[in-house]
Amino acid sequence: MIAGMDREELVLLKFSKEETQTKLRWEHSKEFEYDGQMYDVVSKEIKGDSIFYRCWWDHEETKLNKKLQKLVASAFDNDENKQRNQKQLNVFFQSFFCVSLFDWQASLSEIPVKNCNNTNYLNNFSPIQKSPPTPPPRHS
């Protein structure tokens, strides 16, 4: 049926011999995928290092393959939309937390050795109140 088609309905694709091994994904000797599209080979002509394929551009099979890829991706959580939504959700949740670290290093001059009245200590640290204020506040 394909061999009897009008030449204007066919697509002419030219590849080097190396490209036929690297750029084309062959289903079998008369059918390949190139750039996400399926083609059925009607004729093949070799001229030097180039190979010319006259092909039927199989739109229906291309559409079916894309649907199948989407179903498989969805089944294995490789769906692009799902991954994008997951990344956006992660960014949203990360906005609730402080992720930046502060870099502080104590130097020996800031640490009191014997005397709690050391002025360096008072300038760099606030006192810690260990007991509640006396008397406790009253609530009405």
Image (cartoon, rainbow, N blue to C red):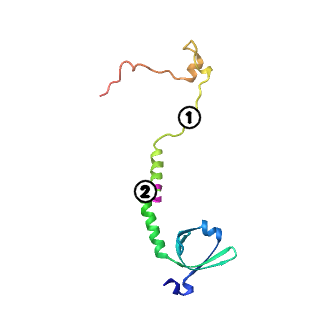
The type of residue carrying mark 2 is Phe
Task: Residue 71: give its label.
Answer: none
Say which residue label 1 marks: 102
Q: Residue furthest top?
A: 114
Residue lying at the far front in this picture: please name it: 29
Q: Quadrant of residue 54?
A: bottom right
Question: Considering the numbered disc 2 on the image, is that residue within a helix, a strand or a loop?
Answer: loop
Pointers 1 and 2 in contact (CB under 8 A)? no
Quarter of the image containing the C terminus?
top left
For the residue labelled by badge 1, is the local secondary structure a helix, a strand or a loop?
loop
Which residue shows up at 50% across the image and 76% down it? 58
Q: Which residues are magenta?
A: 77-83
Q: Earlier in the sequence, mark 1 or mark 2?
A: 2
Q: Residue at x 48, y 52 (%)?
A: 87
**Furthest residue to the left?**
140
Viewed as shown, does residue 128 lie left or right of 102? Answer: left
How far apart marks 1 and 2 lie (CA) works out to 40 Å
Give percent across and percent down for residue 15.
64, 73
Observer-side mark, 1 or 2, equals: 2
How far across and down, in percent of the image, does residue 90 sit?
46, 48
- For mark 1, does the 10 Å Cα neighbourhood hold few (<14), some (14 to 19), or many (20 or more) residues? few
Residue where numbered disc 2 is placed: 76
Q: Quick check: is 129 in the magenta stretch?
A: no
Q: Whole-percent x and y of residue 99? A: 51, 40
Q: Residues within 10 Å of mark 2 (few under 14, many from 20)?
A: few
Which amino acid lies under the numbered mark 1 shown in the image of this protein?
Phe
- The location of residue 7, given as percent across then percent down, is 57, 86
Q: Residue at x 62, y 20 (%)?
A: 108
Could you say which is closer to the camera, residue 87 or residue 30? 30
Pick the front one: 111 or 69: 69
Q: Is residue 76 above or below residue 22?
A: above
